Image (cartoon, coloured by chain):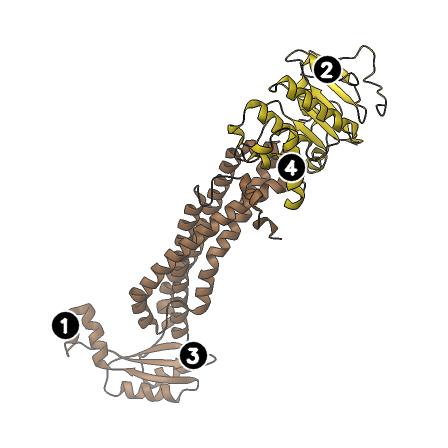
Chain colours: A brown, B yellow
Amino acid sequence: MLDWLFASPAERRLLPGGRFRGPTPFVIAIMTFAMMTVAAAGLALSNAAGLVAEGIENRYAVQVPPGESMLPRALDAARSARGVLKVQAVPEAEMRKTLERWLGPAGADARLPVPALVTLDVAGDADLAAIAARIEAAAPGARFIAHREKLEPVLRAIRVLQWLALALVALMAAAASAAVVLAARGALDTHRSTIEVMHGIGATDLQVTHLFQRKIALDSLAGSIVGAIAAGLVLVLLAGGGAAFAGDLMGTTPLGGSDLVVLALLPLALVVLATWVARTAVLAALRTAT
Amino acid sequence: MLRDLDFRLGRGGFYFLTGPSGAGKTSLLKLLYLAQRPTRGRIQLFGEELSDAPRDSLPSFRRRIGVVFQDFRLIRHLSAFDNVALPLRIAGKGEAEVEGPVREMLAWVGLADRASARPATLSGGEQQRVAIARAVISHPEILVADEPTGNVDAEMAQRLLHLFTALNRLGTTVVVATHDLGLIAATPEAQMVRLENGSMVDPTGALRHPPERRS
Protein backbone atom coordinates (compact mmCIF):
# COMPACT_ATOMS: atom_id res chain seq x y z
CA MET A 1 0.00 0.00 0.00
CA LEU A 2 2.90 2.31 0.70
CA ASP A 3 5.15 0.94 -2.06
CA TRP A 4 5.04 4.32 -3.76
CA LEU A 5 6.83 5.86 -0.80
CA PHE A 6 9.94 3.73 -1.30
CA ALA A 7 11.12 4.69 -4.77
CA SER A 8 14.29 3.32 -6.33
CA PRO A 9 17.16 5.73 -7.07
CA ALA A 10 16.21 5.54 -10.77
CA GLU A 11 12.62 6.59 -10.00
CA ARG A 12 13.87 9.42 -7.81
CA ARG A 13 16.01 10.70 -10.67
CA LEU A 14 12.89 11.18 -12.81
CA LEU A 15 11.89 14.27 -10.85
CA PRO A 16 14.98 16.37 -10.32
CA GLY A 17 15.28 19.47 -8.20
CA GLY A 18 16.10 17.91 -4.87
CA ARG A 19 13.95 17.59 -1.82
CA PHE A 20 12.44 20.34 0.25
CA ARG A 21 12.48 22.86 -2.56
CA GLY A 22 9.42 24.77 -3.63
CA PRO A 23 6.65 26.11 -1.44
CA THR A 24 5.22 22.90 0.01
CA PRO A 25 7.56 22.37 3.02
CA PHE A 26 7.27 26.02 4.04
CA VAL A 27 3.48 26.18 3.69
CA ILE A 28 3.05 22.94 5.61
CA ALA A 29 5.47 24.10 8.33
CA ILE A 30 3.54 27.35 8.84
CA MET A 31 0.18 25.59 8.74
CA THR A 32 1.33 22.92 11.19
CA PHE A 33 2.59 25.57 13.59
CA ALA A 34 -0.65 27.57 13.37
CA MET A 35 -2.87 24.51 13.59
CA MET A 36 -1.10 23.13 16.63
CA THR A 37 -1.14 26.41 18.57
CA VAL A 38 -4.79 27.10 17.75
CA ALA A 39 -5.75 23.51 18.55
CA ALA A 40 -3.85 23.74 21.86
CA ALA A 41 -5.74 26.92 22.74
CA GLY A 42 -9.03 25.26 21.81
CA LEU A 43 -8.27 22.17 23.90
CA ALA A 44 -7.19 24.30 26.89
CA LEU A 45 -10.43 26.29 26.63
CA SER A 46 -12.39 23.06 26.41
CA ASN A 47 -10.68 21.75 29.54
CA ALA A 48 -11.28 25.02 31.39
CA ALA A 49 -14.95 25.01 30.40
CA GLY A 50 -15.26 21.41 31.51
CA LEU A 51 -13.69 22.12 34.88
CA VAL A 52 -15.81 25.21 35.48
CA ALA A 53 -18.99 23.41 34.43
CA GLU A 54 -18.15 20.43 36.62
CA GLY A 55 -17.41 22.71 39.58
CA ILE A 56 -20.68 24.63 39.39
CA GLU A 57 -22.99 21.91 38.11
CA ASN A 58 -24.40 21.13 41.59
CA ARG A 59 -23.34 24.25 43.47
CA TYR A 60 -25.85 26.82 44.66
CA ALA A 61 -25.71 30.06 46.64
CA VAL A 62 -28.31 31.17 49.16
CA GLN A 63 -28.48 34.89 49.72
CA VAL A 64 -29.76 35.48 53.27
CA PRO A 65 -31.14 38.91 54.14
CA PRO A 66 -29.40 40.81 56.97
CA GLY A 67 -30.66 39.96 60.43
CA GLU A 68 -29.27 38.57 63.72
CA SER A 69 -30.65 35.06 63.59
CA MET A 70 -31.33 34.66 59.90
CA LEU A 71 -27.95 33.12 58.97
CA PRO A 72 -27.85 30.41 61.69
CA ARG A 73 -31.45 29.45 60.89
CA ALA A 74 -30.69 29.25 57.17
CA LEU A 75 -27.56 27.19 57.84
CA ASP A 76 -29.47 24.77 60.10
CA ALA A 77 -32.25 24.40 57.55
CA ALA A 78 -29.76 23.75 54.74
CA ARG A 79 -27.75 21.20 56.75
CA SER A 80 -30.85 19.25 57.68
CA ALA A 81 -32.30 19.23 54.14
CA ARG A 82 -32.23 15.94 52.27
CA GLY A 83 -29.70 15.83 49.42
CA VAL A 84 -27.47 18.65 50.66
CA LEU A 85 -23.86 17.43 50.75
CA LYS A 86 -21.96 20.48 51.95
CA VAL A 87 -22.94 23.81 53.48
CA GLN A 88 -20.55 26.69 53.95
CA ALA A 89 -21.21 30.26 55.06
CA VAL A 90 -19.14 32.82 53.22
CA PRO A 91 -17.41 34.94 55.91
CA GLU A 92 -18.62 38.57 56.07
CA ALA A 93 -15.03 39.80 55.72
CA GLU A 94 -14.77 37.98 52.41
CA MET A 95 -18.05 39.51 51.25
CA ARG A 96 -16.87 43.02 52.18
CA LYS A 97 -13.54 42.38 50.46
CA THR A 98 -15.46 41.50 47.30
CA LEU A 99 -17.63 44.62 47.64
CA GLU A 100 -14.53 46.75 48.21
CA ARG A 101 -13.29 45.80 44.75
CA TRP A 102 -16.43 47.31 43.26
CA LEU A 103 -17.25 50.14 45.67
CA GLY A 104 -13.83 51.13 46.93
CA PRO A 105 -13.31 51.85 50.66
CA ALA A 106 -17.11 52.39 51.06
CA GLY A 107 -17.51 48.65 50.65
CA ALA A 108 -15.74 48.07 53.92
CA ASP A 109 -18.00 50.51 55.82
CA ALA A 110 -19.71 48.64 58.62
CA ARG A 111 -22.86 50.75 58.12
CA LEU A 112 -23.33 49.20 54.65
CA PRO A 113 -25.74 46.29 55.05
CA VAL A 114 -24.26 43.14 53.52
CA PRO A 115 -26.37 40.06 52.91
CA ALA A 116 -24.97 36.83 54.23
CA LEU A 117 -24.12 34.19 51.63
CA VAL A 118 -24.23 30.44 52.02
CA THR A 119 -22.87 28.03 49.40
CA LEU A 120 -24.41 24.59 49.04
CA ASP A 121 -23.20 21.50 47.23
CA VAL A 122 -26.13 19.19 46.57
CA ALA A 123 -26.48 15.66 45.27
CA GLY A 124 -27.31 15.28 41.60
CA ASP A 125 -30.76 13.87 42.32
CA ALA A 126 -31.62 16.36 45.11
CA ASP A 127 -35.06 18.03 45.12
CA LEU A 128 -34.00 21.64 44.72
CA ALA A 129 -37.49 23.05 45.15
CA ALA A 130 -37.85 21.28 48.50
CA ILE A 131 -34.43 22.51 49.68
CA ALA A 132 -35.24 26.09 48.62
CA ALA A 133 -38.64 25.96 50.32
CA ARG A 134 -37.09 24.62 53.54
CA ILE A 135 -34.47 27.37 53.67
CA GLU A 136 -37.01 30.09 52.79
CA ALA A 137 -39.28 28.87 55.56
CA ALA A 138 -36.42 29.14 58.06
CA ALA A 139 -35.10 32.46 56.74
CA PRO A 140 -37.86 34.40 54.99
CA GLY A 141 -36.57 36.45 52.03
CA ALA A 142 -33.64 34.09 51.37
CA ARG A 143 -32.84 33.77 47.62
CA PHE A 144 -31.72 30.48 46.11
CA ILE A 145 -29.30 31.02 43.19
CA ALA A 146 -27.82 28.37 40.86
CA HIS A 147 -24.17 29.11 40.01
CA ARG A 148 -24.75 27.46 36.65
CA GLU A 149 -27.28 30.11 35.61
CA LYS A 150 -24.92 32.95 36.53
CA LEU A 151 -21.94 31.49 34.70
CA GLU A 152 -23.83 30.13 31.70
CA PRO A 153 -22.98 33.14 29.44
CA VAL A 154 -19.29 32.67 30.24
CA LEU A 155 -19.48 28.96 29.50
CA ARG A 156 -21.35 29.69 26.28
CA ALA A 157 -18.63 32.14 25.22
CA ILE A 158 -15.96 29.52 25.97
CA ARG A 159 -17.86 26.95 23.90
CA VAL A 160 -18.08 29.42 20.99
CA LEU A 161 -14.32 29.95 21.23
CA GLN A 162 -13.81 26.17 21.16
CA TRP A 163 -15.83 25.86 17.95
CA LEU A 164 -13.99 28.84 16.55
CA ALA A 165 -10.67 27.10 17.25
CA LEU A 166 -11.98 23.95 15.54
CA ALA A 167 -13.18 25.98 12.56
CA LEU A 168 -9.78 27.69 12.33
CA VAL A 169 -8.01 24.32 12.33
CA ALA A 170 -10.32 23.11 9.55
CA LEU A 171 -9.79 26.35 7.63
CA MET A 172 -6.01 25.99 7.88
CA ALA A 173 -6.23 22.38 6.70
CA ALA A 174 -8.27 23.60 3.72
CA ALA A 175 -5.73 26.37 3.00
CA ALA A 176 -2.88 23.84 3.21
CA SER A 177 -4.78 21.57 0.79
CA ALA A 178 -5.25 24.43 -1.65
CA ALA A 179 -1.52 25.23 -1.46
CA VAL A 180 -0.71 21.57 -2.13
CA VAL A 181 -3.01 21.55 -5.18
CA LEU A 182 -1.22 24.62 -6.55
CA ALA A 183 2.19 23.08 -5.82
CA ALA A 184 1.17 19.81 -7.50
CA ARG A 185 -0.10 21.62 -10.60
CA GLY A 186 3.07 23.71 -10.70
CA ALA A 187 5.19 20.56 -10.48
CA LEU A 188 3.14 18.96 -13.28
CA ASP A 189 3.74 21.99 -15.50
CA THR A 190 7.47 21.97 -14.72
CA HIS A 191 7.79 18.28 -15.59
CA ARG A 192 5.27 18.19 -18.45
CA SER A 193 7.82 17.00 -21.03
CA THR A 194 8.95 14.16 -18.76
CA ILE A 195 5.33 13.12 -18.22
CA GLU A 196 4.63 13.15 -21.97
CA VAL A 197 7.60 10.90 -22.63
CA MET A 198 6.62 8.56 -19.80
CA HIS A 199 3.05 8.34 -21.08
CA GLY A 200 4.31 7.85 -24.62
CA ILE A 201 6.29 4.76 -23.66
CA GLY A 202 3.56 3.20 -21.59
CA ALA A 203 3.59 4.68 -18.09
CA THR A 204 0.22 4.62 -16.38
CA ASP A 205 -1.29 7.68 -14.72
CA LEU A 206 -0.72 5.97 -11.38
CA GLN A 207 3.00 5.48 -12.07
CA VAL A 208 3.35 9.18 -12.89
CA THR A 209 1.20 10.17 -9.91
CA HIS A 210 3.31 8.16 -7.49
CA LEU A 211 6.37 10.27 -8.37
CA PHE A 212 4.60 13.51 -7.43
CA GLN A 213 2.72 11.99 -4.51
CA ARG A 214 5.96 10.77 -2.99
CA LYS A 215 7.71 14.11 -3.42
CA ILE A 216 4.84 16.04 -1.83
CA ALA A 217 4.52 13.49 1.00
CA LEU A 218 8.22 13.88 1.88
CA ASP A 219 8.09 17.67 1.54
CA SER A 220 4.99 17.77 3.77
CA LEU A 221 6.61 15.47 6.31
CA ALA A 222 9.67 17.70 6.54
CA GLY A 223 7.49 20.83 6.83
CA SER A 224 5.24 19.30 9.45
CA ILE A 225 8.22 18.20 11.57
CA VAL A 226 9.65 21.73 11.53
CA GLY A 227 6.22 23.26 12.28
CA ALA A 228 5.54 20.77 15.07
CA ILE A 229 8.90 21.46 16.74
CA ALA A 230 8.28 25.23 16.59
CA ALA A 231 4.73 24.85 17.96
CA GLY A 232 5.99 22.51 20.68
CA LEU A 233 8.58 25.08 21.78
CA VAL A 234 5.97 27.84 21.90
CA LEU A 235 3.60 25.64 23.91
CA VAL A 236 6.38 24.73 26.36
CA LEU A 237 7.20 28.43 26.79
CA LEU A 238 3.53 29.23 27.36
CA ALA A 239 3.22 26.36 29.82
CA GLY A 240 6.06 27.90 31.84
CA GLY A 241 4.35 31.30 31.98
CA GLY A 242 0.70 32.21 31.58
CA ALA A 243 -0.49 28.65 31.30
CA ALA A 244 1.05 27.81 34.67
CA PHE A 245 -1.00 30.62 36.18
CA ALA A 246 -4.10 29.25 34.45
CA GLY A 247 -3.19 25.85 35.80
CA ASP A 248 -3.09 27.27 39.33
CA LEU A 249 -6.54 28.78 38.83
CA MET A 250 -7.99 25.59 37.39
CA GLY A 251 -6.22 23.30 39.83
CA THR A 252 -4.87 21.20 36.99
CA THR A 253 -2.69 21.56 33.87
CA PRO A 254 -4.47 23.18 30.89
CA LEU A 255 -3.61 20.25 28.58
CA GLY A 256 -3.96 16.61 29.57
CA GLY A 257 -2.27 13.53 28.16
CA SER A 258 -4.99 12.85 25.60
CA ASP A 259 -4.76 16.48 24.43
CA LEU A 260 -1.03 16.06 23.86
CA VAL A 261 -1.71 12.92 21.82
CA VAL A 262 -4.23 14.86 19.69
CA LEU A 263 -1.68 17.65 19.17
CA ALA A 264 1.03 15.15 18.25
CA LEU A 265 -1.27 13.50 15.69
CA LEU A 266 -2.15 16.80 13.99
CA PRO A 267 1.09 17.11 11.95
CA LEU A 268 0.76 13.49 10.85
CA ALA A 269 -2.85 14.09 9.84
CA LEU A 270 -1.77 17.11 7.81
CA VAL A 271 0.87 15.01 5.99
CA VAL A 272 -1.73 12.35 5.18
CA LEU A 273 -4.15 15.04 3.97
CA ALA A 274 -1.50 16.75 1.82
CA THR A 275 -0.48 13.42 0.27
CA TRP A 276 -4.06 12.46 -0.51
CA VAL A 277 -4.81 15.90 -1.96
CA ALA A 278 -1.65 15.75 -4.11
CA ARG A 279 -2.57 12.30 -5.42
CA THR A 280 -6.12 13.36 -6.24
CA ALA A 281 -5.02 16.62 -7.88
CA VAL A 282 -2.31 14.97 -10.02
CA LEU A 283 -4.57 12.10 -11.12
CA ALA A 284 -7.33 14.55 -12.03
CA ALA A 285 -4.90 16.78 -13.96
CA LEU A 286 -3.42 13.82 -15.86
CA ARG A 287 -6.85 12.51 -16.83
CA THR A 288 -7.85 15.82 -18.33
CA ALA A 289 -4.47 16.48 -19.97
CA THR A 290 -4.27 13.83 -22.71
CA MET B 1 -5.45 17.04 -41.27
CA LEU B 2 -5.84 13.43 -42.27
CA ARG B 3 -8.86 12.24 -44.21
CA ASP B 4 -10.23 9.26 -46.08
CA LEU B 5 -7.57 6.90 -44.77
CA ASP B 6 -8.34 3.23 -45.07
CA PHE B 7 -5.41 0.86 -44.82
CA ARG B 8 -4.00 -2.10 -42.98
CA LEU B 9 -0.40 -2.76 -42.01
CA GLY B 10 0.49 -6.42 -42.11
CA ARG B 11 1.99 -7.91 -38.98
CA GLY B 12 5.75 -8.14 -39.43
CA GLY B 13 5.80 -5.71 -42.35
CA PHE B 14 8.33 -2.97 -43.04
CA TYR B 15 6.83 0.30 -44.23
CA PHE B 16 8.29 3.61 -45.28
CA LEU B 17 5.95 6.55 -44.90
CA THR B 18 6.82 9.29 -47.32
CA GLY B 19 5.36 12.47 -48.64
CA PRO B 20 6.04 16.20 -48.69
CA SER B 21 6.29 18.25 -45.52
CA GLY B 22 2.84 18.90 -44.08
CA ALA B 23 1.34 15.87 -45.79
CA GLY B 24 0.33 14.41 -42.44
CA LYS B 25 3.10 11.85 -41.79
CA THR B 26 3.68 12.86 -38.18
CA SER B 27 -0.09 13.04 -37.53
CA LEU B 28 -0.51 9.53 -38.89
CA LEU B 29 2.35 8.26 -36.72
CA LYS B 30 0.76 9.89 -33.65
CA LEU B 31 -2.40 7.94 -34.34
CA LEU B 32 -0.31 4.79 -34.70
CA TYR B 33 1.52 5.18 -31.41
CA LEU B 34 -1.68 6.24 -29.62
CA ALA B 35 -0.59 9.77 -28.78
CA GLN B 36 -3.75 11.07 -30.43
CA ARG B 37 -7.18 9.71 -31.09
CA PRO B 38 -8.98 10.24 -34.38
CA THR B 39 -11.85 12.72 -34.33
CA ARG B 40 -13.65 10.33 -36.68
CA GLY B 41 -13.07 6.80 -37.83
CA ARG B 42 -11.58 3.71 -36.23
CA ILE B 43 -8.11 2.47 -35.35
CA GLN B 44 -7.43 -1.16 -34.65
CA LEU B 45 -4.12 -2.27 -33.16
CA PHE B 46 -3.17 -5.73 -31.99
CA GLY B 47 -6.68 -6.82 -32.95
CA GLU B 48 -8.29 -4.35 -30.54
CA GLU B 49 -10.47 -1.39 -31.37
CA LEU B 50 -8.62 1.53 -29.72
CA SER B 51 -10.31 4.64 -31.13
CA ASP B 52 -12.44 5.05 -28.04
CA ALA B 53 -10.75 2.59 -25.70
CA PRO B 54 -10.67 3.64 -22.03
CA ARG B 55 -7.69 5.78 -21.17
CA ASP B 56 -6.50 3.31 -18.54
CA SER B 57 -6.18 0.56 -21.13
CA LEU B 58 -3.80 2.49 -23.42
CA PRO B 59 -0.50 2.11 -21.47
CA SER B 60 -0.44 -1.65 -21.95
CA PHE B 61 -0.75 -1.13 -25.73
CA ARG B 62 1.81 1.69 -25.76
CA ARG B 63 4.34 -0.65 -24.12
CA ARG B 64 4.09 -2.85 -27.21
CA ILE B 65 5.03 0.08 -29.45
CA GLY B 66 8.49 1.62 -29.74
CA VAL B 67 8.61 5.23 -30.83
CA VAL B 68 11.47 7.31 -32.19
CA PHE B 69 10.23 10.89 -31.99
CA GLN B 70 11.31 13.42 -34.58
CA ASP B 71 12.52 15.73 -31.80
CA PHE B 72 13.97 12.75 -29.84
CA ARG B 73 12.15 13.69 -26.61
CA LEU B 74 14.92 12.53 -24.36
CA ILE B 75 14.47 13.43 -20.71
CA ARG B 76 17.11 16.09 -20.34
CA HIS B 77 17.97 15.50 -16.68
CA LEU B 78 18.51 11.77 -17.15
CA SER B 79 21.68 10.16 -18.43
CA ALA B 80 21.73 8.30 -21.74
CA PHE B 81 21.63 5.06 -19.72
CA ASP B 82 18.54 6.13 -17.75
CA ASN B 83 16.78 7.35 -20.90
CA VAL B 84 17.31 4.01 -22.62
CA ALA B 85 16.35 2.10 -19.47
CA LEU B 86 13.08 3.99 -19.01
CA PRO B 87 10.76 1.64 -20.99
CA LEU B 88 12.11 -1.37 -19.09
CA ARG B 89 11.68 0.34 -15.72
CA ILE B 90 8.18 1.51 -16.60
CA ALA B 91 7.38 -2.08 -17.54
CA GLY B 92 8.41 -3.06 -14.02
CA LYS B 93 11.78 -4.69 -14.70
CA GLY B 94 14.23 -4.82 -11.82
CA GLU B 95 17.65 -3.19 -12.03
CA ALA B 96 19.28 -6.59 -12.56
CA GLU B 97 17.21 -7.06 -15.73
CA VAL B 98 17.91 -3.54 -16.93
CA GLU B 99 21.68 -3.14 -16.68
CA GLY B 100 22.76 -5.76 -19.25
CA PRO B 101 20.30 -5.02 -22.07
CA VAL B 102 20.79 -1.26 -21.77
CA ARG B 103 24.60 -1.53 -21.89
CA GLU B 104 24.29 -3.86 -24.86
CA MET B 105 21.93 -1.53 -26.68
CA LEU B 106 24.12 1.51 -26.01
CA ALA B 107 27.09 -0.41 -27.37
CA TRP B 108 25.07 -1.33 -30.43
CA VAL B 109 24.31 2.29 -31.24
CA GLY B 110 27.95 3.21 -30.55
CA LEU B 111 27.38 5.04 -27.29
CA ALA B 112 28.84 2.61 -24.75
CA ASP B 113 31.24 5.24 -23.48
CA ARG B 114 28.53 7.92 -23.26
CA ALA B 115 26.18 6.04 -20.94
CA SER B 116 26.38 8.60 -18.17
CA ALA B 117 26.18 11.65 -20.43
CA ARG B 118 23.16 13.94 -20.28
CA PRO B 119 21.37 14.69 -23.58
CA ALA B 120 22.54 18.32 -23.53
CA THR B 121 26.14 17.12 -23.77
CA LEU B 122 25.41 14.79 -26.70
CA SER B 123 25.44 15.78 -30.36
CA GLY B 124 22.21 15.67 -32.38
CA GLY B 125 23.21 12.36 -33.90
CA GLU B 126 24.06 10.88 -30.52
CA GLN B 127 20.75 12.02 -29.09
CA GLN B 128 18.97 10.40 -32.00
CA ARG B 129 20.78 7.12 -31.38
CA VAL B 130 19.80 7.24 -27.70
CA ALA B 131 16.20 7.82 -28.79
CA ILE B 132 16.39 4.83 -31.13
CA ALA B 133 17.94 2.66 -28.43
CA ARG B 134 15.11 3.65 -26.08
CA ALA B 135 12.51 2.78 -28.71
CA VAL B 136 13.82 -0.70 -29.41
CA ILE B 137 15.12 -1.75 -25.97
CA SER B 138 11.91 -3.55 -25.04
CA HIS B 139 11.61 -5.39 -28.39
CA PRO B 140 8.33 -3.75 -29.39
CA GLU B 141 5.81 -5.41 -31.67
CA ILE B 142 5.54 -2.19 -33.64
CA LEU B 143 8.37 0.28 -34.14
CA VAL B 144 7.34 3.75 -35.26
CA ALA B 145 10.12 6.14 -36.23
CA ASP B 146 9.76 9.72 -37.38
CA GLU B 147 12.78 10.74 -39.48
CA PRO B 148 15.11 8.46 -37.49
CA THR B 149 18.18 9.14 -39.60
CA GLY B 150 17.77 12.88 -40.02
CA ASN B 151 20.68 13.76 -37.79
CA VAL B 152 23.16 10.95 -38.35
CA ASP B 153 25.83 10.41 -40.97
CA ALA B 154 25.40 7.92 -43.80
CA GLU B 155 27.36 5.19 -42.03
CA MET B 156 25.28 5.47 -38.86
CA ALA B 157 22.09 5.66 -40.94
CA GLN B 158 23.00 2.32 -42.53
CA ARG B 159 23.78 0.87 -39.15
CA LEU B 160 20.42 1.99 -37.73
CA LEU B 161 18.65 0.62 -40.78
CA HIS B 162 20.29 -2.73 -40.11
CA LEU B 163 18.98 -2.57 -36.57
CA PHE B 164 15.46 -1.90 -37.83
CA THR B 165 15.77 -4.68 -40.38
CA ALA B 166 17.03 -7.08 -37.74
CA LEU B 167 14.10 -6.20 -35.49
CA ASN B 168 11.75 -6.63 -38.41
CA ARG B 169 13.17 -10.09 -39.07
CA LEU B 170 12.39 -10.93 -35.46
CA GLY B 171 8.75 -10.05 -36.14
CA THR B 172 8.54 -6.36 -35.31
CA THR B 173 6.35 -4.31 -37.63
CA VAL B 174 8.39 -1.25 -38.61
CA VAL B 175 6.93 2.04 -39.83
CA VAL B 176 9.49 4.70 -40.70
CA ALA B 177 8.57 8.19 -41.82
CA THR B 178 11.43 9.52 -43.91
CA HIS B 179 12.53 11.73 -46.77
CA ASP B 180 15.74 9.72 -47.12
CA LEU B 181 15.51 8.06 -50.53
CA GLY B 182 18.79 6.27 -49.89
CA LEU B 183 17.27 4.56 -46.89
CA ILE B 184 14.26 3.48 -48.92
CA ALA B 185 16.41 2.24 -51.75
CA ALA B 186 18.53 0.21 -49.35
CA THR B 187 15.48 -1.68 -48.12
CA PRO B 188 13.94 -3.30 -51.15
CA GLU B 189 11.73 -5.57 -49.08
CA ALA B 190 9.95 -2.56 -47.55
CA GLN B 191 6.65 -1.23 -48.77
CA MET B 192 6.26 2.47 -49.40
CA VAL B 193 3.24 4.41 -48.20
CA ARG B 194 2.88 7.90 -49.60
CA LEU B 195 0.77 10.65 -48.07
CA GLU B 196 -0.30 13.78 -49.91
CA ASN B 197 -2.51 16.47 -48.41
CA GLY B 198 -3.62 14.18 -45.63
CA SER B 199 -4.68 11.35 -47.92
CA MET B 200 -2.96 8.14 -48.83
CA VAL B 201 -1.71 7.43 -52.30
CA ASP B 202 -2.26 3.74 -52.82
CA PRO B 203 -2.78 3.20 -56.54
CA THR B 204 -2.35 -0.56 -56.35
CA GLY B 205 -4.66 -1.06 -53.37
CA ALA B 206 -1.97 -3.16 -51.72
CA LEU B 207 -2.33 -1.33 -48.43
CA ARG B 208 -6.01 -2.15 -48.20
CA HIS B 209 -5.33 -5.84 -48.50
CA PRO B 210 -1.75 -6.55 -47.41
CA PRO B 211 -0.43 -10.05 -46.97
CA GLU B 212 -0.86 -11.21 -43.39
CA ARG B 213 2.85 -11.89 -43.01
CA ARG B 214 5.69 -10.75 -45.16
CA SER B 215 7.69 -13.61 -46.66
Q: Amino acid at mark 2?
A: Ile
Say whether residue A283 is left or right of residue A166.
right
Q: Position of residue A14 (x, y in %)?
A: 55, 39
Which structural element holds mark 2?
A: helix
Indicate the quadrant where residue A138 lies: bottom left
Spatial separation of the CA atoms under disc 1 and disc 4: 98 Å
Say whether residue A208 is left or right of residue A171.
right
Q: Tag 4, which chain?
A: B
- Foreground disc of the pair 1, 2: 2
Spatial separation of the CA atoms under disc 3 and disc 2: 107 Å
- Foreground disc of the pair 3, 4: 4
Indicate the quadrant where residue A53 lies: bottom left
Kindly identify which residue carries mark 3.
Answer: A128
Q: Tag 2, which chain?
A: B
Task: Return the disc, 1 or 3, that comes first in the chain's sequence.
Answer: 1
Circle 1 packing at 10 Å, graded few (<14), some (14-19), many (20+), is some
Spatial separation of the CA atoms under disc 1 and disc 2: 116 Å
Kindly identify which residue carries mark 2.
Answer: B184
Say whether residue B167 is left or right of residue B27.
right
- Residue A106's mark? 1
Q: Amino acid at mark 4?
A: Val
Q: Amino acid at mark 1?
A: Ala
Q: Nearer the viewer, residue B78 or B97?
A: B97
Kindly identify which residue carries mark 4.
Answer: B102
Which structural element holds mark 4?
A: helix
Q: Amino acid at mark 3?
A: Leu
Q: Nearer the viewer, residue A209 or B101?
A: B101
